[in-house]
Image: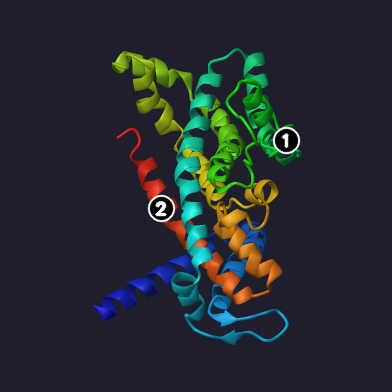
């Protein structure tokens, strides 16, 4: 068994060398990108994983501590466990819902006339390019009588007495953050879906009608979605990244840290230890756990997308 495996690895290496020799011009063109990718993506990830097994405060040489950072994180850091719970809750709700909303809106907008379609795309893509989004939402959910929600509630008789502290009361903070994240989720994924819908050949729909397609739902499942697997996968990756990397929204709206850590996320915890406490080893362990969670979620989403149309 060992000799068979050794021969297999040797054959693969020989084939790789032969392929490089025969296609060296193509590999030379790929070399600049490969160097940039390895330098700025692969190496930082590998270095971060290494530092996760050390105590490193950036002022002293890193000291290897084994699994101590992971043990402290999983068994002794209640704030981190709270952050994991909050992050998973946000990801489970905003990830799939935002992903489906982006695709459904793109699907409906695709059938509009050209001018209306362009205007609708601009409206839905605006949250991604807006620079004052947090100021607007802070004004809407302001915890005084001048906040839009509080003012409307008082005028309608829904809020009496003191105004509601939407951004500092743990009872309201999570729902508010979920609303803002969902609104902001209609960004790159939505734009990719719109672009993907334009690449589908209309003749496939005509052939589908001949083969027995009878309504738009069958058209969607058997023609549209299978032709958009690449865009669907890109949108899924973007949704995963956005839902697990929530930090700016909670920090800008609810403060850092938030009241009772009600909307504290894994990235908030990472920023706390990496940028404020300078415990880079501990921060690297947090980043590694987040990286593994995202990889696992991405794997299962890819399997689900590959089943579309089967």
Q: Which residue is mark 2?
A: 299
In screen coordinates, is 15 left or right of 199?
left
Q: Residue at x 49, y 83 (%)?
A: 66
Count of numbered circles in the view: 2
- Between label 2 and label 1, give the one nearer the viewer: 1
Q: Is residue 177 above or below residue 33?
A: above
Task: Look at the image and name its color scheme.
Answer: rainbow
Q: Which residue is mark 1?
A: 139
The residue positioned farthest toward the front in the image shown: 161
Cα–Cα span, label 2 and label 1: 39 Å
Q: Is residue 157 above or below residue 1?
A: above
Determine the image quadrant of residue 284.
bottom right
At mark 2, the secondary structure is helix
Q: Residue at x 63, y 69 (%)?
A: 273
Q: Are marks 2 and 1 in contact (CB under 8 Å)?
A: no
At mark 1, the secondary structure is helix
Viewer-proximal residue among 53 and 249: 249
Q: Residue at x 65, y 26 (%)?
A: 154
Q: Is residue 45 above or below residue 261?
A: below
Position of the C terminus by quadrant:
top left
In screen coordinates, is 221 left or right of 166?
left
């Amino acid at each position: 068994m060992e000799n068979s495996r050794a021969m297999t690895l040797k054959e693969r290496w020989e084939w790789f060398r032969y392929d490089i020799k025969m296609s060296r011009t193509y590999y030379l063109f790929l070399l600049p990108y490969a160097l940039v990718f390895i330098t700025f993506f692969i190496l930082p990830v590998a270095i971060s994983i290494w530092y996760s097994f050390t105590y490193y405060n950036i002022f002293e040489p890193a000291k290897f501590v084994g699994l101590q950072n992971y043990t402290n994180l999983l068994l002794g850091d209640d704030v981190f466990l709270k952050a994991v719970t909050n992050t998973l809750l946000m990801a489970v709700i905003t990830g799939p819902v935002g992903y489906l909303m982006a695709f459904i809106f793109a699907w409906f907008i695709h059938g509009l006339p050209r001018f209306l379609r362009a205007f609708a795309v601009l409206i839905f893509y605006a949250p991604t390019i807006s620079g004052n989004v947090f100021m607007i939402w802070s004004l809407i959910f302001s915890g005084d009588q001048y906040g839009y929600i509080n003012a409307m509630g008082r005028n309608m008789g829904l809020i009496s007495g003191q105004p509601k502290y939407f951004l500092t009361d743990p009872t309201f903070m999570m729902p508010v953050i979920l609303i803002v994240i969902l609104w902001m989720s209609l960004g790159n994924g939505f734009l990719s879906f719109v672009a993907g819908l334009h690449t589908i050949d209309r003749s496939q729909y005509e052939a589908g009608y001949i083969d027995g397609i009878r309504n738009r739902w069958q058209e969607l499942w058997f023609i549209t979605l299978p032709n958009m697997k690449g865009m669907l996968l890109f949108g899924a990756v973007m949704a995963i990244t956005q839902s697990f990397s929530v930090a700016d929204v909670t920090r800008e709206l609810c403060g850092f840290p938030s009241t009772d850590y009600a909307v504290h996320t894994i990235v908030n915890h990472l920023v706390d230890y990496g940028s404020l406490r300078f415990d880079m080893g501990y921060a690297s362990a947090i980043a590694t756990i987040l990286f593994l969670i995202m990889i696992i979620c991405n794997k299962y989403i890819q399997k689900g997308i590959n089943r579309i149309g089967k």
